[in-house]
Image (cartoon, helix red, strand yellow):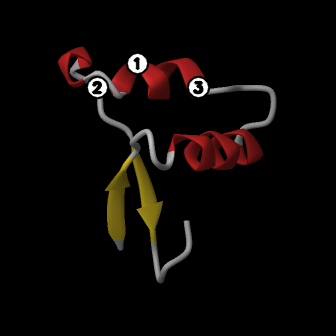
Amino acid sequence: MTLERITIRNIDYAIQIQEELFPGESGRTNFEESLDEKSGYEYYLLYEGGVI
């Protein structure tokens, strides 16, 4: 199992995965706010065997 922090590089992919898992909801605002180090929030993608 590997964790990868959501960054500007992978935020679009994280949003896509989140919307597939929870249709009708979006974490975009939360993910974008977490890009600011001062926000105090961190979100991660979880990989197991190379798969999200």
**Residue 20 rendering spot, x and y as whole percentages:** 75, 47
The residues tagged by marks 1 and 3 sit, at their Cα atoms, a distance apart of: 9 Å
Contact? badges 1 and 2 (CB < 8 Å):
yes
Residue 43 x/y as whole percent? 38, 38
Which three-letter amino acid code belongs to the residue tagged 3? Arg
Q: Nearer the viewer, mark 1 or mark 2?
A: 1
Q: Determine the residue positioned at 52% across, 41% down.
A: 11
The residue wearing badge 1 is 33
Q: Pointer 2: what residue?
A: 41
**Position of residue 21 measured from the top left corner of the image (x, y, whole percent):** 71, 47
- Which residue position is annotated with label 3? 28
Tell me which label, 1 or 3, sits earlier in the chain: 3
Q: Is residue 32 above or below residue 2?
A: above
Label 2: few (<14), some (14–19) or many (≥20) C-alpha neighbours in 10 Å: few
With 11 as the anchor, is 35 left or right in this view?
left
Tell me how far mark 1 sits from mark 2, CA to CA.
Answer: 8 Å
- Say the numbered circle drawn on residue 13: none
Q: Earlier in the sequence, mark 1 or mark 2?
A: 1
Characterize the local packing of mark 3: few (<14), some (14-19) or many (20 or more) Cα atoms within 10 angstroms.
some
Outermost residue on the front side: it is 9
Q: Amino acid at mark 2?
A: Tyr
> Residue 12, position in %: x, y?
61, 42
Which residue is painted at 28% across and 25% down in the image? 41
| Residue at 46% in and 24% down | 32
Q: Classify mark 2: helix, strand or loop.
A: loop
Q: Quadrant of residue 40?
A: top left
